[in-house]
Amino acid sequence: MNEKMTIAVVYGSTRQGRFCDTVVNWVLTELWAESGIRVTLIDPQQLKGPAGEAAVNVAALEEKIAEADAFIVVTPEYNHGYPAALKELIDSCYEPWHAKPVAFISYGGLSGGLRAVEQLRQVFAELHTVTIRDTVSFSNVWSQFDAAGNPFKAAEAKAGLLVMLRRLMWWASALKAARAENAYSGVAA
């Protein structure tokens, strides 16, 4: 397949002053440098319903998830888990996630968000996704980026991202072809 793959980058946090923006901006800079990729963003802050409504706009979310061939979830770890806003986003729809790959970039304190990622693997398994083994993790994240949002160990971070991205793209291509040949929803019917 020579067509571009659409990767949706999913923000995992909605906290005021979230560090997620710094990590996502780095990821976007790296993704835009790659060929064969179209990037879309899924930000729970942008998917809220009309003013005064706290719930996610499910129709808009389903459309964004359906158009994506693969996902990169950028998540912090809060209290040894992933944020409630991310859980709400994930649980707001079901079938659009099916038979698509998901990769993770995590950040936080000492564990670098890896406990959140392990929990997310269980959640995404129930959505019939394929999670990528390779991750990018930033422990003690506040000391990993300069004031401009660049990682201090840029080459190391990029190397990890590229390994993860190559595997994500392989799965995206394989699963897109499989979905085109046989609708996943019809497999168990």
Image: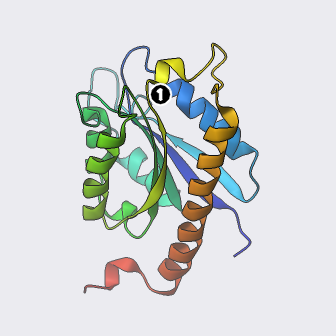
Residue 176 quadrant? bottom right
**Quadrant of the rendered structure where residue 2 is?**
bottom right
The residue lying at 55 percent from left, 67 percent from top is 172
The residue drawn where x is 58% and y is 46% is 40
Give x and y (percent) for residue 157: 61, 39
Q: Nearer the viewer, residue 82 or 57?
A: 82
User: Left or right: where does residue 65 sit relative to residue 84?
Assistant: right
Residue closest to the eye, 161 or 110? 110
Q: Is residue 28 above or below residue 90?
A: above
Identified by mark 1, the residue type is: Cys
Q: Position of residue 55 (x, y in %)?
A: 26, 34
Residue 129, image x, y percentages: 37, 65
Q: What kind of colouring is applied to the model shown?
A: rainbow
The quadrant in which the C terminus is found is bottom left
- Give the camera-side residue of 141 and 124: 141
From this viewpoint, is residue 89 visible?
Answer: no
Query: Can residue 52 be seen here?
Result: yes
Q: Residue at x 61, y 56 (%)?
A: 163
Question: How many numbered marks are there?
Answer: 1
Residue at left 69%, top 41%? 30
- Quarter holding the N terminus is bottom right
For mark 1, does the 10 Å Cα neighbourhood hold few (<14), some (14 to 19), or many (20 or more) residues? many
Secondary structure beneath dot 1 equals: helix
Q: Which residue is labeled 1 in the image?
A: 20
